[in-house]
Image (cartoon, rainbow, N blue to C red):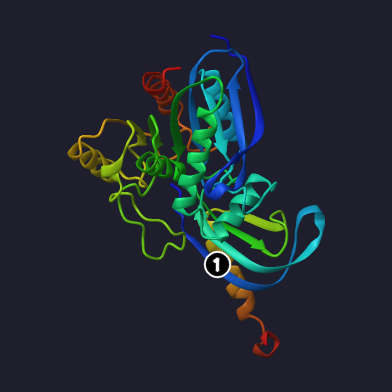
Amino acid sequence: MSDSLCATTVRITGDGGDEIEAYLARPQEDGRRGGVVVIHHLPGYDRATKEMVRRFAELGYDAICPNLYSREAPGAAPDDAAAVARANGGIPDARLVGDVAGAAAYLRALPTSNGRAGVIGHCSGGRQSVLAACELDLDAAVDCYGAFVTGTPPDEFPLKMTNLVDKLPGLRAPLLGLFGEADRFPSPSEVAELDQILSDHGKEFEFHSYEGAGHAFFAVDRPSYNVAAANDGWERIAAFFAKHLGA
Amino acid sequence: MCTYLTVKAEIDGSAKGPGGSWMHVSDATVYFDHPVHAMAEHTLNIDFTDPSRDPAARVAVELTAESARRLVAAIQEALAAVPEEMLT
């Protein structure tokens, strides 16, 4: 397999038929392969997230990250766009689902597509990855420490968000969950609750919780970065997507 | 974690923003969450903005929890030292 790839900004059709910005990275070689939708975290469509998109291309997938803040702040710097989105109360769940649907459809329409598409997100994107896999026909989903998949957001949270407990029986894709044992959101007990719910409903899933790792252990540009957890996590992700997306 | 916790306040004043230009600010968004730049897992972040302008028209600060408390105390102390008639 070659590690040559091509990365560029494209326009895709998102929720409600809106044209939104997205970052696309693809292996240069021909051949059929799966696609990966990367959901950026609350801090935005940033450099670190785009690095992950390119990494998935290097792993052999067509990968895309829709800019979830395209509507609020087109062309703005990622941190400024995130500030606008936050001040507006965050991204509505229904719009997120529509944007991920558009991104997955874009990948599946590529001439290199094998028809399969997965989704991955970190932090707020972890919750959104599970949400997308409950609402859309996807082939694999990865939740990296998404808070409030289970558990209850405090009432005073102005960002409109609920847990996904009611939706979990409808999970349509195998789920890989990667968590830090030292994380409090999601806490180990919330991860255990998710494990129990998915087991009760006979869902296909695989969870790994890393000792000594806190939240955001994949984030290479933050003090929370945990080398051992991140390295093992990337191995798990590669194996999971290889199994379900067939790169 | 992403705390998602966001508190907004209407304000009226000015801030020195991008490019060294002063601008009017009407909103403050206050949240405790991941910083973009500060070397801490979480910080108390404040965005001073005017939503009618471009998203880049923003003055942002990211403070450790302890330094945010010291800032609050300093603001309270400064305001408390001002004669009441000057505050109206």
Callout count: 1
Identity of the residue drawn at 52% across and 44% down: A99
- Going by the numbered disc 1, the residue's amino acid type is Lys
Q: What element carries label 1?
A: strand
- Quarter holding residue A29: top right
Chain ID, mark 1? B
- Quarter holding residue A222: top right
- Res. A52 in view: no
Residue A51, compared with residue B10, is above or below; it is: above
> Quick one: label 1, few (<14), some, or many (20+) residues within 10 Å?
some
Say which residue label 1 marks.
Answer: B8
- Quarter holding residue A152: bottom left
Q: Position of residue A50 (x, y in %)?
A: 59, 33
Identity of the residue drawn at 69% across and 55% down: B55
In this view of the protein, which residue sits in the foreground, A148 or A108?
A: A108
- Locate residue B87 relative to residue A154 in the image: left or right: right
Q: Where is residue A113 in the image (x, y as percent from the top left)?
A: 51, 22
Identity of the residue drawn at 50% across and 16% down: A32
